[in-house]
Image (cartoon, rainbow, N blue to C red):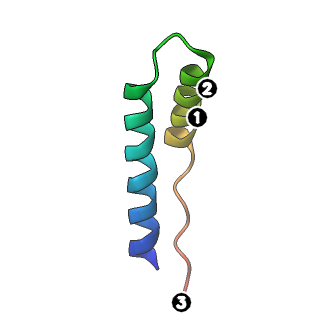
Amino acid sequence: MKALAIVALAVALEAGFLFTLAVPARTAVAQDGRAAQVELARAPAPVPARS
């Protein structure tokens, strides 16, 4: 399950990176996407579940 979460996060970050390359820099959509990336990068790391 942990590996799946890591893969999902990697895919989301890669998709966001490709999105920022594809959208012109000065559009509102690009600015919102970059703000979401920064917010995600600053989010606290998830706490591992205890088993």
Mark 3 or mark 1, whichever is nearer to me: 1
Q: CA distance from mark 3 to mark 2?
A: 38 Å
CA neighbours of label 2 inside 10 A, class few (<14), some (14 to 19), many (20+): few
Among the 4 quarters of the image, the one containing residue 4: bottom left
List the residue tagged with mark 1: 36
Where disc 2 sits, the SS reads helix
Residue type of the residue flagged with mark 1: Ala
List the residue tagged with mark 2: 32
**Which of 26 and 41 lies nearest the eye of the viewer?**
26
CA neighbours of label 1 inside 10 A, class few (<14), some (14 to 19), many (20+): few
Looking at the image, is mark 3 or mark 1 earlier in the sequence? 1
Residue type of the residue flagged with mark 2: Asp
Q: How many marks?
A: 3
**Which of 22 and 42 lies nearest the eye of the viewer?**
22
Residue 5 placement (x, y as % from top left): 47, 68
Residue 35 placement (x, y as % from top left): 58, 27
Residue shown at 38% from the left, 73% from the top: 3
Among the 4 quarters of the image, the one containing residue 18: top left
Q: CA distance from mark 3 to mark 1?
A: 32 Å
Where disc 3 sits, the SS reads loop
Residue shown at 56% from the left, 14% from the top: 27
List the residue tagged with mark 3: 51
Residue 9 placement (x, y as % from top left): 45, 56
Residue 48 vertical position relative to residue 35 in the rendered view, above or below: below
Q: CA distance from mark 2 to mark 1?
A: 6 Å
Residue type of the residue flagged with mark 3: Ser
Residue shown at 52% from the left, 32% from the top: 38
Asked if the residues shown at circle 2 and circle 1 are in contact, with their CB atoms under 8 angstroms apart, the answer is yes
**Which of 44 and 10 lies nearest the eye of the viewer?**
10
Left or right? Give the position of 50 relative to 17. Answer: right
Asked if the residues shown at circle 3 and circle 1 are in contact, with their CB atoms under 8 angstroms apart, the answer is no
Where disc 1 sits, the SS reads helix
